[in-house]
Every structure is written in C-alpha cells, then in structure tokens.
Amino acid sequence: MRRKLVVGNWKMNGDLVRNRALLEEIARQAPDEVDCAVCVPFPYLAQTQTLLSGSCVDFGAQDLGEFAEGAYTGEVSAAMLGDFGCRYVIVGHSERRSMFGEGDALVGRKALSAVRGGLIPIVCVGESLDEREAGQTERVLSRQLDAVAKAVDAEMLSRLVIAYEPVWAIGTGRAASPSQVQGVLSFIRGWLAQRTSAAGDVRILYGGSVKPESAGALFALPDSDGGLIGAASLVAAQFLGICEAAQIASRDNVRQFEGLK
Ligand code: PGA
C-alpha cells in the first residue's frame, strides 16, 4: 500500500528565527504513520537538517540544476542537496515554469538529474484556468508528463512522486473540488500504467490551496496519496492539521484494505 505523503513547499519565505519555531514544532508533533516533509529555500537546508535530525520529518529543496557539476553560476546540483541530507526535491513547480521560463524538456532533465543523484523528485504538473476551460487539461498534462518520460526510463519513472497542481488553485484559496482532483489523479495513474508496471506504487499528490479543513476529503480520494502544501505549510498548526488529516485517511485506507482481505 502506498504511504501518504504531505510535503510543505515554503517557497521564498522564512528566516532563521521563524524557521526554528516552525521546524521545532513540526518535528515534535508530526504524525509518524504518514510521511511528512518540508521543502525549504537552499540557505536553510543546514538549519533544517539540524533541527529535524532524529525526528520523523523529511526535508528537501524546491529546485535543482540539471547538471552534475561545473561552470553553472548560481546552480545547485543534486549531489549538493544530498550532502545536506535532502530526500526530496520539487521539480517543475508552476512558478518556475511561468516566472522563470522552465519548459517541459528542462523539467524532464531536472527530474533525471534528481533521480541520478539519489533524490526523489516531486514533479509538478497542472493546467491553467484557460486550459481547463478550453477542455485541454488532459492534453496539457500529457505533454508535461511525456517530457518527463522522455528524459527518464520506466524504472526511474516508478521512483518519482507526481504532484497535480492546477495553476488556478495555487495560492488562490480556491482548491479544486474532490471530483475534479480524482478525475485528474486517475488520468495520471492511467498514464503511468501505460509506461510502468509499478504505476500502482507511484505516489500522486494534489496541491493548490489545501487547508486542514479541505485536506480530509482530498486525501480520501482513491488515487490520492497526499498533498503539496504552500501557504498552509508556513503555519505549524495548519501544516500539522493537514498531516493529521493524511494520517486519518491512511488509517481509513488500512481498514478498507483489511476488510477486503
Ligand atoms: P498553496 O501552494 O497551497 O499556497 O496554494 C501550493 C504550491 O504552490 O505548491
């Protein structure tokens, strides 16, 4: 059975003092029946590594360079992230795609560089509002996912986490409805099934305005394995509330599974 995963995406927020309070509270209270992680800005990786050490909370970065080493001013490699104990790295977040010009092919190469470096890439895909309204959601997702499949082989594909983040739901307070989310998650699961026999093991998250109140219904969906959390991950009580919702959904899954045996 897939373990639920809740990942905080801090984006470009935080400072040493605020991080300490947030990380200490999360380290103390995060539930251990689900996987919880925070993806922090690069300069805070060392602090995060220290403060989360000995806890059940994992961590990672929000981006990485596509190259392994060399004259690439400003870039950070997968190996460097590994040096600081990162387990995850977000790749292809819509803010990087729209504001920093990252195209599908680059996102694929970054996913490859992450896997090669021993990290778990959380590959973000999602459509804009115009694309959804034009009925193009599946076409856009296929294009974004195909570019990743072109860069990595089937075995590597099974080691990714995929995050469905509709652009119109990110930071807007307007989460996609559970039925919208399930529709897309099952489309992604089907896409995976055509490429790897391990499609049933790949974790697919939803992200976009997830709050403790909405998390339960989203995490209970058949193809949902958790969430990628932006704004709410900066408030310990909210992030922990969302992790708790994942734990409840996970226990329900186990009960259903046991009932079926
Ligand atoms: P949000 O962000 O939860 O603030 O909508 C999600 C994300 O960008 O990953």
Image (spheres, grey):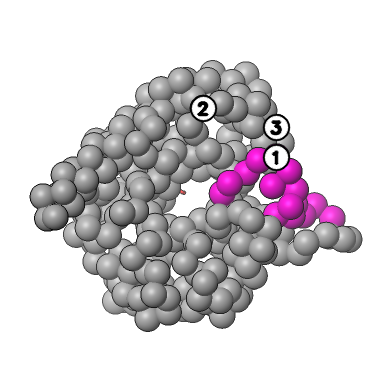
Label 2 belongs to which residue?
55
Based on the picture, tell me whether residue 190 belongs to the magenta stretch.
no
Please give the name of the residue rendered at 39% of the width and 75% of the height, measured from the top-left corner: 197
Tell me which numbered mark, 2 or 3, is placed earlier along the sequence. 3
Q: Which residues make up the magenta segment? A: 73-88
Instruction: Find residue 6 and report its image quarter.
Output: top left
Quarter of the image containing the N terminus? bottom left
* Helix, strand or loop at mark 3: helix
Horizontal arrangement in the rendering, residue 212 relative to residue 239 (left or right):
left
* Helix, strand or loop at mark 2: loop
Label 3 belongs to which residue?
46
Q: Evaluate whether residue 87 shows in this view.
A: yes
Tell me which numbered mark, 3 or 1, is placed earlier along the sequence. 3
Labels in figure, total: 3
Q: Residue furthest front?
A: 261
Whole-angstrom CA distance, mark 2 to mark 3, is 15 Å
The type of residue carrying mark 2 is Ser
* Helix, strand or loop at mark 1: loop
Tell me which numbered mark, 1 or 2, is placed earlier along the sequence. 2
Horizontal arrangement in the rendering, residue 76 relative to residue 15 (left or right):
right
Badges 3 and 1: C-beta atoms under 8 Å apart? Answer: yes
Q: Mark 2: few, some, or many residues within 10 Å (few <14, many ≥20)?
A: some
